Amino acid sequence: MKIELELKSLEELKADTLIIPIFKEDSLEQPLLQKINEFSGGVLASLLETEELKTKKTEITYLYAAKESPIRRLILIGAGETAKATVQLFGQLAATATRFMITKKIASGVVLIKTDLALDLITRHITEASLLAPYEQNKYQKKEEETFEVEQLSLSFVGQSIERSVFDKAVFRGKAVAEAANFARDLTVEPGNKLTPTEFARRATEMGIALGLDAKAIGEEELKKMGMGALLAVSQGSEEPAQLIVLRYNGSKSADSKPIALVGKGITFDSGGISIKPREGMWEMKNDMAGGATVIATLCAIANLKPEIDVIGIVAASENLPSGKAYKPGDVIKTYSGKNIEIIDTDAEGRVVLADALHYAVEQKPCCIIDLATLTGACIIALGNHRAAMIGSDESLMSEIRQASERAGEKLWQLPLTKEYQDMIKSDIADIKNLGGRYAGAITAAAFFKRICW
């Protein structure tokens, strides 16, 4: 889909479809709505008078324009209260409009935007959202007809202007983020028989090399020599060999630069191992590598955007299956850091493989380490599906991440990490155990990382 800047005035505009955010307070006293009413042949005035115009966020009123109008169709999309509008809102509206256009087989449209908010940020969010919105998980479905695609969205900033260079930069950034996110989606929805640890590593390194990253995958023979006993312990129940995927982006111009380390969990299928999961929902465990996919995709976006920083992405990829060779509850395994883990539950495998990956990250002498993982089910029980948990030991870094999440329109909630939680993962026979019990499962997972790596 092309995202273009529309420079014609509303009076000069000719378009197949106009997409107009409608706020709760909007009325025909506004020149913009007066013009839209003309296009609608007076229908908009009737809708306002009868209070039938939908203004609740993302609700759509769909109209054909008057015959004499230079516009063919109108998509009026509810935007809520003006005072509550954010740059992220325009992304949500663009996503809704894009999906609606697909259902109606509308190939192009012009979005009319009248706002006092930052136009470059609005452009970026609209670009990102409109490219993410059409994504479908239908790779393995037989298609009876060609998938319809929206070809172009043009943005018209009513009464305001944006420099072409600023607009183009915002579109480029939005595209880079959306393409990376869709790549992560492609990886995450793949079934476990298609995306094995080896295939995961192949796709990640192939993409990395294509984008100019230093990319490698460390296989089991080398992992054994390195002493990555935790990653290998989880992998030993499977016929598929483990992989440690490492991508590096070197963008800093300073010789003293320390990289940001991103570490991801890459369990391409998680049965729970010997501590096997219930059958309900086990099929979803093909996506237990979503954290690793996010790390890979983030490096891809960074490679395209080319910031002047150094970043290393590390993903521990494995399957967690039961077999005669699988690691067992009660086993003690030696990690890459040299510390020993008592295995209480083989279904708490994510923190086990990440123990080795995180210590590998520590060896790279980074300025900070950010772990991304599907850890753990207890987190969803605590926060539901509307926020992700954030746990860390550096309050300054946590503050930066929180601010970044707000700019991106993502929602995070910080959980505590105090000494009491460390006590919950003490082992009687090893340095640490991999499960702290039923309570505070997400927090004790973070406490495990803090204890095992430092």
Image: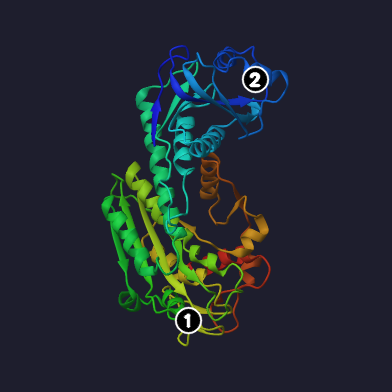
- Amino acid type assigned to the residue bearing label 2 in the image: Asp
Q: Secondary structure at mark 1?
A: strand
Residue 139 percent across, percent down from the top left: 42, 56
Res. 26 mark: 2
Residue 368 visible somewhere in the drawing: no
The image shows residue 103 at horizontal and vertical percentages of 51, 39
**Residue 333, label in figure:** 1
**Observer-nearest of 335 and 141:** 141
Left or right: 312, with 439 as reference point:
left
The image shows residue 137 at horizontal and vertical percentages of 47, 54
Is disc 2 placed on a helix, strand or loop?
Answer: loop
Amino acid type of the residue that numbered disc 1 sits on in the rendered structure: Ile
Mark positioned earlier in the residue sequence (2 or 1): 2
In depth, the one of 234 and 95 nearer the eye is 95
Which residue is rendered at x = 38% and y = 57% of the image? 313
Instruction: Give the vertical position of 315 relative to 432 (above or below).
Output: above
Q: Residue furthest right?
A: 50
Image height check: is 48 above or below 303?
Answer: above
User: In the rendered image, which quarter is residue 231 located in?
Assistant: bottom left
Label ID, residue 420:
none
Inspect this view and state whether residue 1 appears.
yes
The N terminus sits in image quarter: top left
Marks 2/1: CA–CA distance? 65 Å
Q: Quadrant of residue 357?
A: bottom left
